[in-house]
Image: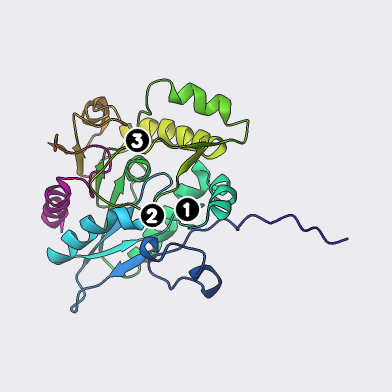
Amino acid sequence: MNSTKPTAPSVVYLSGFDPVPEPLLGKLWPEGQPFYLKQANKPNSIVICLHGFGATPYETRPVADACVQRGMDAVAPLLPGHGFKEDEDQRRAIKTMTRVNVLEAIRQEIAKGRKLYSKVFLYGQSMGGAAALAIAGEGLVDACAATAPALKLPAGAGFAMVFMGKIDLNIKKKQKPRSFVNYSYSAHNTIAAAQLQRLSLHARKMLHHITCPVFIAHSRNDSTIDPVVTSWVQARAKGSVEIAWFDKSDHTMPLDVQGKDVAAAIAVFFCMQS
């Protein structure tokens, strides 16, 4: 007997280097799809841009654009379980995200970049920032930048996420007034959130192994990620670490009020490593 139960979308990692498969085009946010920005004359450096938990490559576009303006190429993959525009697809897909498949997706994107460029840089926002630092600890990139890296989740959230990760719940996010648009899921799934916590803890362990140059942009007024994470990176990473503060912004730094300044600072940092 055929079951009518809807099947979960397969684990979706969409490379920015490749076209989006036709069957997925209608299911994803058009504005949040992966992208690849190229110079007319191919440079030797590319910046891989990683979005945050529940979000899409859209939130990394200001950084990508700033890097392109500085003469580098930029690419942004869609990480596993993300990017679906309909609530039903979101609820099923996000549960396929794991610490393991997020990191493996990034490794695959780096491998593709290495075939085309001599320098591969990695940038990430929030969850993407934690993942970028973890991968930097593996020695796979030439430099790493992050905005508000999710190395420490909000007070009490870590324990709750691990505990609640055994129960499948979708908790609607409290939407705060903001001056920008972002394409992100409206609820946090507890199973996926437990994986985010595991990714966060793993990234903290990998800080000791980082030897490449690192740039961290943060806000002392971030309502999600404690600014203490900047001191953790400074104390543990073995390469050079630069910290820049943008205190008029909240958590989604590339899109917030100082987004252009944040993006420009990251682009300058990577340009110096080219």
Name the residue tied to disc 2: 56
Mark 3 crowd level (few <14, some 14–19, many ≥20, 10 Å Cα):
many
Residue 140 relative to residue 88: left or right:
left
Name the residue tied to disc 3: 150
In front: label 3 or label 1:
1
In front: label 2 or label 3:
2
Name the residue located 31 percent from the left edge and 70 percent from the top edge: 116
- Give whichever of 171, 270 is nearer the camera: 171
Q: Which residues are magenta?
A: 250-274
- Give whichever of 120, 52 is nearer the camera: 52
Are discs 1 and 2 less than 8 Å apart at CB?
yes
Mark 2 crowd level (few <14, some 14–19, many ≥20, 10 Å Cα):
many
Q: Secondary structure at mark 2?
A: loop
Q: Residue 166, how many percent across, how many down?
A: 62, 30
Residue 76 relative to residue 179: left or right:
right
Total marks placed: 3
Mark 2 and mark 3 lie on one chain; the one further toward the N terminus is 2
Mark 1 crowd level (few <14, some 14–19, many ≥20, 10 Å Cα):
many
Name the residue tied to disc 1: 82
Colour setting: rainbow
Mark 3 and mark 1 lie on one chain; the one further toward the N terminus is 1
| Amino acid identity at mark 1 | His
Seen in the picture, residue 210 relative to 34 is either above or below; the reply is: above
Q: Is 270 part of what is drawn in magenta?
A: yes
